[in-house]
Image (cartoon, rainbow, N blue to C red):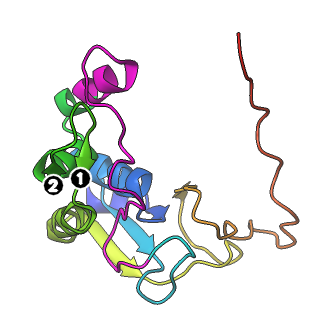
Amino acid sequence: MSRENTPSIAVIGAGLAGCECAMALARAGVPCTLFEMKPLRFSPAHSNPDLAELVCSNSLRSNDPASAVGALKNELRALGSLTMLAADNARVPAGKALAVDRARFSAHITRLVEAEPLIRLERREIPSLEHFDFETLRQDTAPSGLPPPTPAGGGGGPPPPPPPTHHGG
């Protein structure tokens, strides 16, 4: 695929999903631009300027391969997940949980993203998609406490209600 035929792909938000998406694109030979508002602006939950900041050292839950989330982690490792590479690198003792040193985890992902030649990291906020000139857009919708960018066409309105939660059997 030549550079002229390569679509312009933007990934907004350099959280776990945004960094994973940008790295998957790069590994597939597709250049992208990854936008991150930090360190210019922080959500109420974040304080570290690095990418993919976790808000709790045990956010990744169980690492037990007999559990569903542990089995999923093994599948992600087999697929070369950036998140799992960083988590294994920053792991701290926590029994069957996959707990990490949050600063080391984020710093590891930041270094890998910044070193990837097919990812252009832009540290700026995208408050609206009104004049956003990219052919393909992937928005990281992590629960940061901040509203998502206003859709192209303006207005935006309130975000859609969350999906219903189901409790019990």
Q: Residue at x 30, y 25 (%)?
A: 70
Whether 26 is drawn above or below 158: the answer is above
Left or right of 1 on screen, residue 156: right
25 to the left or right of 113: right
Q: Which residues are magenta?
A: 47-75
What is the three-letter code of the residue carrying label 1? Val
Please give the name of the residue rendered at 64% of the width and 67% of the height, measured from the top-left corner.
145
Amino acid type of disc 2?
Ala
Labelled pair 2, 1 in contact (Cβ < 8 Å): yes
Q: Which quarter shows the C terminus?
A: top right
The residue sitting at 52% across, 70% down in the picture is: 45
Q: Tell me where residue 131 appears, x and y as whole percent.
A: 66, 78
Main SS, magenta residues = loop
Q: Is residue 61 above or below residue 167?
A: below
Marking on residue 100: 1
Point out which mark residue 90 bears. 2
- Residue 67 among those drawn in magenta: yes
Q: Nearer the viewer, residue 102 or 35?
A: 102
Q: Residues within 10 Å of mark 2 (few under 14, many from 20)?
A: some
- In this rendering, position of residue 155 left or right of residue 45: right
Helix, strand or loop under label 1: strand
Of the two numbered discs 2 and 1 on the same chain, state the one appearing first in sequence.
2
